Amino acid sequence: MVDYNQKIKEFEEELKKTKYNKATQGHIGLVKAKIAQLKEKQESRGVKKVGRSEHGYSVRKSGDATVLLLGFPSAGKSTLLNKLTGANSEVAAYAFTTLTVIPGMMEYKQAKIQILDVPGIVAGAASGRGRGKEVLAVIANADLVLMVVDVNYPEHFPAILREVWESRIRLNKKKPEVFIKKKAMGGIQIGKTVPLEIDDDTLRKVMREFKINSADVLIRSPIDIDDFIDCIEGNKKYMPAITCITKVDLATAAKVSQIKKELNADIVISAEQNLNLESLKELIFQKLDFIRIYMKEPKKDADMNVPMIVLRNSSIRDICDKLHKDFSKKFKFARVWGKSAKHPGQRLMLNHVLQDQDILEIHMR
Ligand SMILES: Nc1nc2c(ncn2[C@@H]2O[C@H](COP(=O)(O)OP(=O)(O)OP(=O)(O)O)[C@@H](O)[C@H]2O)c(=O)[nH]1
Ligand SMILES: [Mg+2]
């Protein structure tokens, strides 16, 4: 059997030795493409061996959005969950106290936000250490990742980022606008609407490494080589994240602000001492990027007191699914007033994307 790990290591060593510049970028692109492919192969072999059935926790999503707490063992995730939601997840001074997914519900500004406490992850989690694979798989179903870092272990932070990256998740990054249309022949044509660091030659080399020899490529975002490989593979998930440093009661103010700067963290808290927990709630609310939709019944005025809280870019279908499990089956059409409507009361169908403060009237069969 091929030792993918060994090969990946060799290529990574080579990357470390190569300085990035105009002359080497083609080679770097190629090596990165090779690493990406080896990792995919390694991943698919792992799945075969373990069997899908053993994979993953089953968590039912509920509420208006789901936030996942991610951090090393003993970082303070369960303590934080309990404080934010009034849940009762076991807290203890030893590692791996939490062994499964513990949900809690945080109510804030009329939004119901589900928070999931999961086992701690460690370096190597993405390739199966601890319950890492299962934990990281839960992220894919969340709407926001809250990374929890113990102020006394800042070195855990880059390790978490690495595991998340390995799990095909890209944090705080919009999906790059790159469109690749494969063709049977004709070579690789590249169109760009923005100036790029990488040259066309490198892009072509990388694509050929992925066995794409003919394609029309349109690039509308300022991407780097890693972004481009992500776009070719097309299996990455892009989602928002918050970096939170906790247990700041255990460090001096000077140390806290130094670590905050080093990690470029969003907020510092102490769950135990109730420090900055309200600000954290507000930050979670902001990051989730909710919009408000007012429901209206035919021939009646809209209820402007209690909006439905949904994530930005929600469609009429998302609202229907939230109201009742078979609303979208019985759906006939909808009328919309507000920013997303071309004219007041526009007649629209399930795929229409709503905007903040739209008024929605659903007509059923
Ligand atoms: N001083 C201080 N201690 C804290 C704080 N938050 C948590 N702790 C302590 O840190 C230890 C670990 O806390 P947990 O909440 O169980 O940590 P966890 O991240 O859920 O750990 P695992 O479930 O093992 O992954 C416990 O002894 C907590 O009392 C805090 O803000 N300040
Ligand atoms: Mg825990």
Image (cartoon, rainbow, N blue to C red):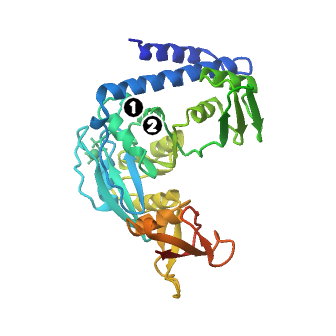
Q: How many marks?
A: 2
Q: Position of residue 178 (x, y in %)?
A: 66, 39
Which structural element holds mark 1? helix
What is the secondary structure assignment of the residue under circle 2? helix
* Quarter of the image where the N terminus is located: top left
Residue 33: where, in percent of width, then height? 58, 23
The residue drawn where x is 44% and y is 48% is 145
Q: Which residue is mark 2?
A: 164
Residue at left offset 45%, top offset 23%: 41
Amino acid type at mark 1: Ala
Sequence order check: which comes first, mark 2 or mark 1? Answer: 1
* Residue occupying image coordinates x 27% and y 36%: 54
Q: Nearer the viewer, residue 100 or 275?
A: 100
Q: Residue at x 47, y 66 (%)?
A: 319
Q: Is residue 34 above or below residue 100?
A: above
Q: Are marks 2 and 1 in contact (CB under 8 Å)?
A: yes
Image-based side of 257 in relation to 115, left or right: right
Examine the rendered structure and indicate whether residue 205 appears above or below residue 240. Answer: above
State the image coordinates of residue 246 (x, y, percent, origin top left). Answer: 39, 48
Q: Quadrant of ligand 2?
A: top left
**Extreme residue toward the front, this view:** 365
- Name the residue that disc number 1 marks: 126
Mark 2 residue's CB less than 8 Å from ligand 1: no
Give left or right: position of 310 versus 339: left
Residue 66, relative to residue 18: is it above or below?
Answer: below
